[in-house]
Amino acid sequence: SSGINAGRSQEAVVSTQSTGKRVYLNTVQQLEQRVRVAESAGEEGKTWVVSLVRYLALNKDETRLRELLQRLLASSSPRVHGSDRLELVGELLKVVGASCQRVYSEFKQQLEWAANRS
C-alpha cells in the first residue's frame, strides 16, 4: 500500500512539474509574440522585450536569455525597439543582473567590446 501511495505521489509531482513547464513555455511564447508584433512600435516593443527578459531572468532561463541578447548584439541595425541597440542591451543586462550572474557577466563583456568598436 505504501508503495502505491509513493508512486501516486511521484506521479503528482511529475504532473505538477509538467503543468508548470507548460505554463512557463506558454508565457514565454506569448511574450515573444508580443515582442515580434511590437518590433516596429518603438517604446511598446521595448516594454515587451524588457518584460520578456525579466521573466526569463526570474526563471533562470539562461539559454533563452543568451539567445535573445546575442540576437540583439548581432543585429546590424543601430536601433532596435526604438532605442539605440547597445543602450537597450545595457538596460536589459540591468534586468538580468542578480538573477543570472553568469549571463550578465558574459554579455557585459560583449557589450563593452561592441561599444568600443562603434
Image (tube, rainbow, N blue to C red):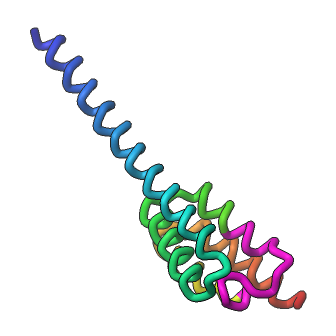
* Nearest to the observer: residue 41 or residue 68: 41
Q: Bounds of the magenta span?
A: 69-86
**Residue situated furthest right in the rendering:** 117
Query: Residue 36, relative to residue 77: is it above or below?
Result: above
What residue appears at the point 74 percent right and 67 percent down from the top-left corner?
71
What residue appears at the point 18 percent right and 11 percent down from the top-left corner?
3
Residue 13 appears at what percent x and percent y? 27, 33
**Residue situated furthest left in the rendering:** 1
Image quarter hosting the N terminus: top left
Horizontal relation, residue 48 to residue 58: left or right: right
Tell me the quarter of the picture where residue 33 sits. bottom right
Would you say residue 94 sits in the magenta stretch? no
Residue 16 appears at what percent x and percent y? 29, 38
Query: Residue 58, relative to residue 111: is it above or below?
Result: above
What residue appears at the point 48 percent right and 74 percent down from the top-left corner?
51
Would you say residue 73 sits in the magenta stretch? yes
Tell me the quarter of the picture where residue 113 sits. bottom right
* Nearest to the observer: residue 30 or residue 57: 30
What residue appears at the point 14 percent right and 18 percent down from the top-left corner?
5
Horizontal relation, residue 20 to residue 50: left or right: left
Residue 12 appears at what percent x and percent y? 24, 29
Image quarter hosting the C terminus: bottom right
Residue 29 appears at what percent x and percent y? 52, 55
